[in-house]
Image (tube, coloured by chain):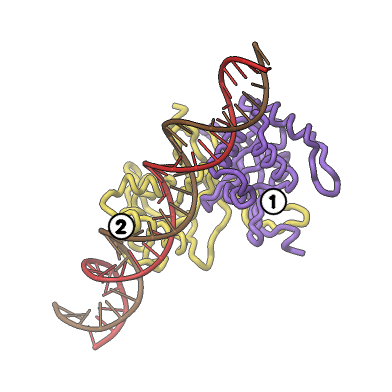
Chain colours: A purple, B yellow, C brown, D red
DNA sequence: AACACAAATGCAACATAATTGCAATTAAAA
DNA sequence: TTTTAATTGCAATTATGTTGCATTTGTGTT
């Protein structure tokens, strides 16, 4: 369980570092900045988002950061029908060995924001003759901020 | 309701043509070939798949075929976390005006095939403060052919 | 059946996105 | 502090997607 500031959603440096360590990733500036950005904003971002945000880092480094985060279970990819993959922080402690694959996401048609939702309400799906291993739900609509 | 051959899944030329007409699309070789390919194989394909299959057509034409099919409600885009959009034939008669947005798909981890599943079992999702307009479910696992 | 017009196609050029190899740098273990 | 292997940034390359335009083609009309 992460400890975030109630007001600004910031996370302690040491906790951030531990997340990387726990997933067998070296602690570098780029990785710390990117991870902090995701956690602080509590939403999903695409590569393009990162490129715009972190101009101090090379595009290739950002690509590789997303890749290593995904490989080592820090992030998961969120399916999209736009061809633009977004990434979200894995809520449960995922690792390469033990990865929670069921995810539920909400994409706002208005502002475009993608959020990770609680995974406890994903239905168990069974289909005759198929082996279903993973259920991914993508909801679209309007988020509270855009409704208001 | 389409009439497909029980053995080979082939569809009559006139029926194929009617699908295009009904969606206000001109009948061209490329569109007929592509639509027939999707229906005959009863699965979803990416642009890349089409490019490999239909070398007789220009890349741009295939891009535009997928685009017009999607615009006019013949195909729908299937979300994916690979960054590779796949397209599926709309089961109900979708049109630009009346489009059925709830879809359920299965992707085989083994052979990579993407199939459209019946939409009647998609749950109604309600989230406090959100307006949910569309529910997309993507299942992953192993398909009957790969299990056997 | 021929005509006219709008739409679709193919090609070339262009724009954007993603990947690879490699030298320099840096994190972390010895 | 030293050593080692991973990470980074840069340049070059490849892949993917888009646009403009001349030519061809489908379809409604004469």
Q: Where is residue B26 in the image (x, y as percent from the top left)?
A: 34, 67
Quadrant of the image occupied by residue A91: top right
Report the side of A102 relative to B143 (left or right).
right
Residue behind mark 1: B125
- Which one is in front, A74 or A27? A27
Residue D26 position (above or below residue B47) = below
- Which one is in front, B64 or B111? B64
Q: Which chain carries label 2?
A: B
Q: Which residue is drawn at 62% across and 38% down?
A: A76
Residue behind mark 2: B30
Residue A50 position (above or below residue A111) = above
Q: Position of residue A56 (x, y in %)?
A: 62, 46
Name the element at disc 2: helix
What crowding class fits label 2: few (fewer than 14 Cα within 10 Å), some (14-19), or many (20 or more)?
some
Q: Residue at x 67, y 37 (%)?
A: A29
What crowding class fits label 1: few (fewer than 14 Cα within 10 Å), some (14-19), or many (20 or more)?
few
For the C terminus of chain A, which image quadrant?
bottom right
Q: Which chain carries label 1?
A: B
Quadrant of the image occupied by residue A21: top right
Residue A33 seen from this side: yes
Report the side of A47 relative to A123 (left or right).
left
Marks 2/1: CA–CA distance: 39 Å
- Which one is in front, A108 or D9? D9
């Amino acid at each position: 369980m992460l400890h975030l500031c109630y007001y600004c959603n910031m996370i302690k440096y040491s906790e951030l570092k531990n997340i990387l360590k726990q997933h067998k990733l070296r602690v570098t500036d780029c990785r710390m900045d990117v991870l902090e950005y995701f956690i602080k904003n509590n939403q999903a971002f695409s590569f393009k988002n990162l490129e715009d945000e972190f101009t101090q880092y090379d595009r290739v480094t950002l690509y590789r950061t997303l890749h290593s985060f995904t490989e080592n279970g820090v992030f998961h990819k969120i399916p999209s029908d736009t061809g633009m993959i977004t990434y979200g922080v894995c809520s449960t402690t995922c690792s390469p060995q033990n990865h929670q694959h069921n995810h539920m996401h909400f994409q706002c048609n208005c502002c475009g924001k993608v959020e990770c939702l609680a995974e406890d309400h994903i239905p168990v799906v069974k289909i005759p003759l198929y082996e279903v291993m993973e259920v991914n739900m993508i909801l679209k609509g309007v988020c509270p901020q855009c409704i208001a």
